[in-house]
Image: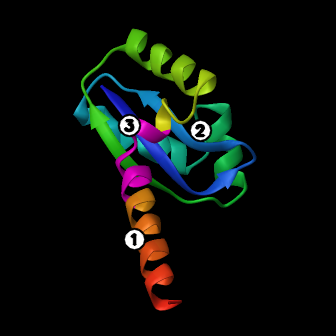
Amino acid sequence: MIYILHFNTPYKHATHYIGYTASVDSLETRIGHHLDGRGARLMNAVARAGITFELAAIFPGDRTLERKLHKQSAASPSRGIYSICPLCRYLAREKAELSKLAGLLSM
């Protein structure tokens, strides 16, 4: 199973973490490791920096798909992680609506 963590504040260039866990049952443990700064180096740095995150998505997949998503994200963030993160898509829609509303109010 693949999961996406959406950082509430970017850590340097990183805004997300894409991870793999064997099952839904192990996901809670894995998230706990990330909160404690154990596991991936990026998540250790995020924890030390006090950055919070949201579990943005979970979907079926294996380590091969996880690696493919990592490569796709690195090559083109706009077609990579931002296109599959539900929180990013939601925030982009909200920003567009606010911009539209601001334009109407300034008339």
Of marks 2 and 3, which one's residue comes earlier in the chain? 2
Nearer to us of marks 2 and 3 is 3
Q: Residue at x 71, y 53 (%)?
A: 48
Q: How busy is the neighbourhood of tag 2: few (under 14 within 10 Å), some, or many (20 plus)?
A: some
Q: Which residue is denoted by mark 3 in the rendering?
A: 84
**Disc 3 element:** helix
- Separation of marks 3 and 1 at Cα, in angstroms: 20 Å
82 vs 9, nearest the viewer: 82
Q: Which residue is denoted by mark 2 in the rendering?
A: 38
**Disc 1 element:** helix
Q: Is residue 88 magenta?
A: yes
Do tag 2 and tag 3 residues touch (Cβ < 8 Å)?
A: no
The three-letter amino acid code for the residue at tag 3 is Ile
> What are the residue bounds of the magenta stretch?
82-90
Of marks 3 and 1, which one's residue comes earlier in the chain? 3
Q: Is residue 6 above or below residue 26?
A: below
Nearer to us of marks 3 and 1 is 1
- Left or right: 3, with 5 as reference point: left
17 vs 43, nearest the viewer: 17
